[in-house]
Amino acid sequence: MHTVVKSLIAGAAGTSALNIATYLDMAIRARGASSTPQQAVEKLTDLTDVSLGDGEQAENRKEALGSLLGYATGAAAALCYGLLASGRRPSWPVGVSALTALAMTGSNAPLTALGTTDPREWPPSAWISDAVPHLAYGITAYAAYELLRS
């Protein structure tokens, strides 16, 4: 199986784990979903002068596109990892750390650049809410990638 395919499968598995961890956190702490992805979509559509429609249609499209951006980030992080790790077998702490960092950077850097969030202003609870699901992504994506390499 080609590196790109293995990476994309690992990214999908990692993204599923990230979503499960996020939704468990939301259920346990009874917290609402983040509106940051929708805000990013709104900023991007403003920058590109693309219309999402009006009213409820626009809101529904923002929500859907925000979620799709998350899947794209998960796929891209694993793809970067797979291309960098091709021909190597990083140990699990290195691989998990790299995938976690790639996913966190891939999601937070664009959001910060768009001005929808500023991690420097996050309280510790926000860092935990962000880091734990990304760690679940890193562990799962690493395990999936290594299983597919075998």
Image (spheres, grey):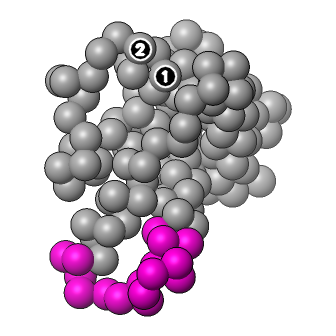
Q: Residue at x 23, y 82 (%)?
A: 48
Relative image position of residue 35 (x, y in whole percent): 42, 49
Circle 1 sits on which residue? 129
The quarter of the displayed image where residue 84 is located: top left
Q: Is residue 52 part of the magenta span, yes or no?
A: yes
Q: Quadrant of the C terminus?
A: top right
Tag 2 secondary structure:
helix
Q: Position of residue 130 (x, y in %)?
A: 45, 26
Q: Nearer the viewer, residue 40 or 97?
A: 40
Identify the residue shown where x is 31% and y is 87%: 50
The magenta span reads 46-62
Give the percent coordinates (x, y) of residue 91. 58, 13
**Residue 105 location in percent, x, y?**
34, 36
Report crowding for label 2: few under 14, some 14 to 19, many 20 or more residues within 10 A (C-alpha): few
Q: Main secondary structure of the magenta part?
A: helix
The amino acid sitting under disc 1 is: Ser
Residue 125 disc label: 2
Q: Contact (CB < 8 A) between labels 1 and 2? A: yes
Image label count: 2
Rendered position, 1 above or below 88: below
